[in-house]
Image (cartoon, rainbow, N blue to C red):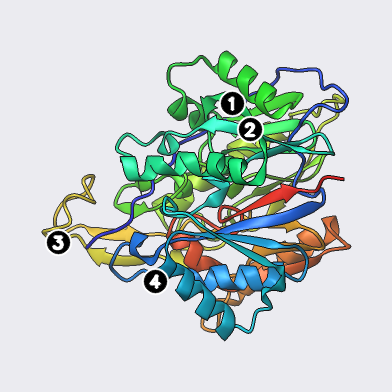
Amino acid sequence: MKYLITLFAIFAFSCTHKVEKKVAEFTYPPEWEPHESVWIDFPDETNWGGGALPPDYPARIEIIKNLINYVPVNVITKSKQTRGILDSMLLEAKINRENINIFQHPDVVGASIRDYGPILLTNGETYQMADFEFNVEGAVYGDSTFLKRAKIDNILADSLGYAVKPIDLNSEGGGFITSSNVLLLFEDYAKTRNPDLSMVEIEKRFLEALNMEKLIWVKEPMLLDKNWHKIEHTYGQGGNYHMDAYLRFVNDSTILIPTINTAIKDKTPLLKADYEASLANLKRLKQETNIDGKKFKIVEIPYPDVSLYQYQFPFVSGDEEYFVQSQLGDTITYVPIMGYSNFLITNGAVLVSEYWKPGLPESEKANDEKIKAILQDYFPNREIIGIKNALMLNWFGGGIHCQTMQVPKVY
């Protein structure tokens, strides 16, 4: 049994360091600002591992189909063969190609364009790409094939005419979340990617890279997003605590945080551990202040019952390479990195995961409806769209936000 193991890194909570923001300087706009377009990748099918997990092409097609009603979509893919699959799926789904631009590059390996695609700063008139270093999300055994992804943002910058701002720091786009002024990061995320730098220096470089005024460190990592071995005999892919799988700004003063219902917290060791972590983070977040000294509004959002979606199988001979923390005969639990935080805000719409299907408890349907209602409250003039195939993305360690990257609008 083989799995595509995409390594990322880990994270945590504290705060404060300020940088004066200057007028007309390049900065990283919050996601709710207008977009020129949105990127999505369509990886080569040979990148996927074997076993019971299906390729996630239908989820990507669903995202494209919904996005083009609101914003132009740039699709990047690897080969002519995969481009042919993409073309046929777009045709089958009866998707209008007028609002779609397709790019092809041989180094599109794996997925998650948010992590290796262009991270664009703007001064309102033009772009500057924040060119972070890329070390395969801090992976200790990331190979040269995955390292090739580090070049893609530069290749796109060259072809699209973006100025480049070199950043002497390892990071991916999904690792941080920002408002207009504030940056959220897990401590362990930063440490694992930049082990030779002090936390003070990492903070300084992040604030300068994105032209933010304050950084809030989150201390308690969520095991669901830990890559591969999570706890006991539980495994699955993940971003190693990418912030876009956890905390999200919906405006400059409001942060969404997923919390696990007490009714399900004891169903698995993973749920129990993440329940405790979220409680600790929630308590600390309520004490954090914005750049004006006022406390943030912290809104709790639902958390799906991951135990309903996981699958289990016996650890048999031949799998030793993958399940080194377990022994032959153990029952392996494989989980998707699912959740509602991995949503995309764009022009006129918010795309969010939708999980309930017939046969699942009504409580899961209630979770789907609750998150859509919360998002509608904060984005009353945008359509809240549930992506019904989002779970396909979660099996491979990502989600809607991971597989997309916005291009800010300039005037």
Q: Position of residue 351 (x, y in %)?
A: 69, 63
- Mark yes or no: residue 172 visible: yes
Q: Which mark is residue 54?
A: 4
Q: Amino acid at mark 1?
A: Pro
Q: Are marks 4 and 1 in contact (CB under 8 Å)?
A: no
Q: Earlier in the sequence, mark 2 or mark 4?
A: 4
Q: Amino acid at mark 2?
A: Ala
Secondary structure, mark 2, is strand
Q: Earlier in the sequence, mark 4 or mark 1?
A: 4
The residue beneath circle 3 is 316
Q: Amino acid at mark 3?
A: Val
The residue beneath circle 1 is 166
The residue beneath circle 2 is 130
Name the front one of labels 1 and 3. 1
CA gap between label 2 and label 1 equals: 6 Å
Quadrant (top left/top right/bottom left/bottom right) for the C terminus: top right
Name the front one of labels 2 and 3. 2
